[in-house]
Amino acid sequence: MNTAVIHLHPSGPLVALIGNPNCGKSALFNLLTGSRQKVANYAGVTVERKEGRYLNAAGKTVRVLDLPGAYSLHPRAPDEQVTCDVLAGNAAGEKRPDLAVCVVDATNLRRSLRLVLAVRRQGMPVVVALNMADRAERQGIHVDAERLSAELGVPVVRTVGVMRDGDAQLRRLLDDPALWRRADESGAGAAAAAASTRGDHETVHGILQRLGLDRLVAHEPSDRIDRVVLHPLAGPLILLAVMFLMFQAVFAWAEAPMGWIEAATAWVSEGASALLAEGWLRSLIVDGLIAGVGGVIVFLPQIVILFFFILLLEDAGYLPRAAFLLDRLMARVGLSARSFIPLLSSHACAIPGIMATRTIADPRDRLVTIMIAPLMACSARLPVYALLIGAFIPQRQIGGLVELQGLVLLALYLGGIGGALAVAWVLKRFTQAGRQVRPLMMELPQYHWPAARNVLLGLWQRVLIFLRRVGGIILALTVLLWLLASYPAPPEGATAAAIEYSFAGMLGQALAVIFAPIGFNWQISIALVPGMAAREVAVSALGTVYALAATGEDTAAALMPLIAQGWSLATALSLLVWFVFAPQCLATLATVKREAGGWKWVLVMAGYLFALAYLASFVTYRTALLLGAG
Amino acid sequence: MNDDQRSLCLDRVEAGMPYAVLQVRYPDAAADWPQRLEELGFLPGERVMVMARAAPGGDPLAVRVGHSTYALRRQEAACVQVKPWPREPA
């Protein structure tokens, strides 16, 4: 089901980069291949596959595969499994690499070299890239590359992933054709012998002793930062401040560019309206395509800003610390702290939130996080909340301090968070995989200054993924919704709103039967159908159903008195609760399909959210009726 | 030898003091934890130190082993048996 799997490989030698997590492998990959990268998924799993290419001195294209980081070749997680399978030539749709570049962290040879020994047993030509060589020097670790090469029996070159030309030595080495043909003499025999972590550890210990490197150095600057950042009291306060800043930025900085995108959308649709004659084509292009795509693209600035912060914090090494501080809280509902950032991000929009679950290594945790992400109140729900609260909740101060309307809004947000945690807890309590204790065992890498190249490349890749979604499935779905809302056209001399005669109208009328027990009238039911495109569209759809001529923000103002008169308070509360839980926007569902790998999870999500929303609205409506709010 | 040889569990040791890994034990919970811990570097003879404990309850812990630092939950740290690091020559 993964559309992005690449099965047709171009010719050219294939190099695999392999290394421990946090060894600077991706930085080296970025340096080697620049922006000539393809990000996709491995066949059948949601593990990110990164391939790039570069031209060698002979003008030949060399393909480079950036394998997921691994501590050993005994796979524990799906990403490590991919690494093992690719190296062994067992991965579906993957060619076995012609050469492996083992990227080792020169400041942590103790751990890195064990992996080198394991890769060497795979029997393919191996090269060791002594990465972060500059940092090792600064820490007083002087590695003699030639002696290390002699000890390991494979070529060793120095690399600095975060410096221009930091890959020069590696490139020069890979230009040597003899290297690729080199039969690995240590291969087959050693592979037969059962390799143990302890045995490899002894070997590494011996090598380090002979090179005079068997000495521990303190991580002074990093430890000093950690004394504050991981402090039981200061740590959480810093985390809170970082999160607050991040979300201030997401909303404040994004406001202007979002305005530009809205203005541009309006300008384009006006232009298109002027160019095209009145008719179905104009309606399709203006009301379907431009409005639909514009309505999703408008979230791009928030996505860019959010990922900018996430990538920055990730690259600097702060994210694992945040996860450390939040582990207890998240463990209680059966998740790891890695789920925190994606869930928090979902308050802006569930799409970047779900995309951010890629930082969660455990597949079960990742899936649960994806499933509960839409429960976090996204910014598209605000217009709906504002309309209903404005129309039904009186402006009143409670105890002279708190505004009732604000309190209701807060309750809606907390309802979403509470719902998400409750669902996670239920999944922990009542599923087989949930009851299993999964270890944390998460590395806290040394801090370092984020490299602009890595952050920008990562940002660019996220933007591309989002835009490709918009251009593909989201575009198709908005056009489908337009079709439903526009056809069949109303008969001659029709008096009611055109949408009532369309398929969407018919669907709404049919849905009204289902929604009657939770207090929705047929107008609401119809508005929910186009609301599938994006939640806030429900407001303008209500305007259409109530045959209002006003557009945009005026719709809400004109609607308020109408619905305040027409609906009961019980109906309004029920609708508010519906919007907290309902599976609403198709763009999110489309993202789930990509990230969770298949339509099955889309159906599961839509089904459980629908059931949850219906149940919650039912309880709300009936309770309100009992209390006399009918 | 002397009482320095007493083994302790890593989740209970004093923060900021060096210890040496004796062995990694199988807990009741999960059989593949010890192997994982060994792969991360918790191997006999390695130097370990608890760098920080999260509040409240001191769970999880930040543990330095060799040149790496890991966040371990208490149950995970409890699998690692340690003894005080022999006093270093001044």
Image (cartoon, coloured by chain):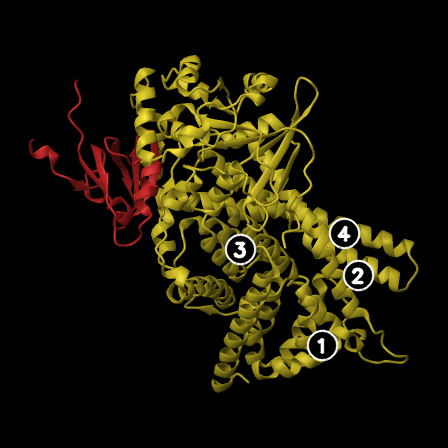
Chain colours: A yellow, B red
Q: Which mark is residue A52?
A: none
Q: Which mark is residue A347?
A: 3
**In the image, what residue occupies the spot 64% across and 51% down?**
A299
The x, y position of residue A365, in whole percent, is 45, 54
Count neighbours of disc 1 (C-alpha within 10 A) and say few if under 14, some if 14 to 19, many if 20 or more: some
> Which quadrant does the C terminus of chain A fall into?
bottom right
Q: Amino acid at mark 4?
A: Thr
Which residue is label 4 attached to?
A265
Q: CA distance from mark 1 to mark 4?
A: 29 Å
Q: Secondary structure at mark 3?
A: loop
Q: Amino acid at mark 3?
A: His
Query: Of the residues under marks 3 and 2, which one precedes in the sequence?
Result: 2
Query: Of the residues under marks 1 and 4, which one precedes in the sequence?
Result: 4
Q: Secondary structure at mark 1?
A: helix
Q: Is residue B55 visible?
A: no
Asked if badges 4 and 2 are on one and the same chain, I answer yes
Asked if residue A184 is positioned above or below residue A238 in the image, the reply reads above
Which residue is label 1 attached to?
A507
Query: Of the residues under marks 4 and 2, which one precedes in the sequence?
Result: 4
Which residue is label 2 attached to?
A287
The x, y position of residue A118, in whole percent, is 42, 32
Q: CA distance from mark 4 to mark 2?
A: 11 Å
Residue A489 location, quadrant: bottom right
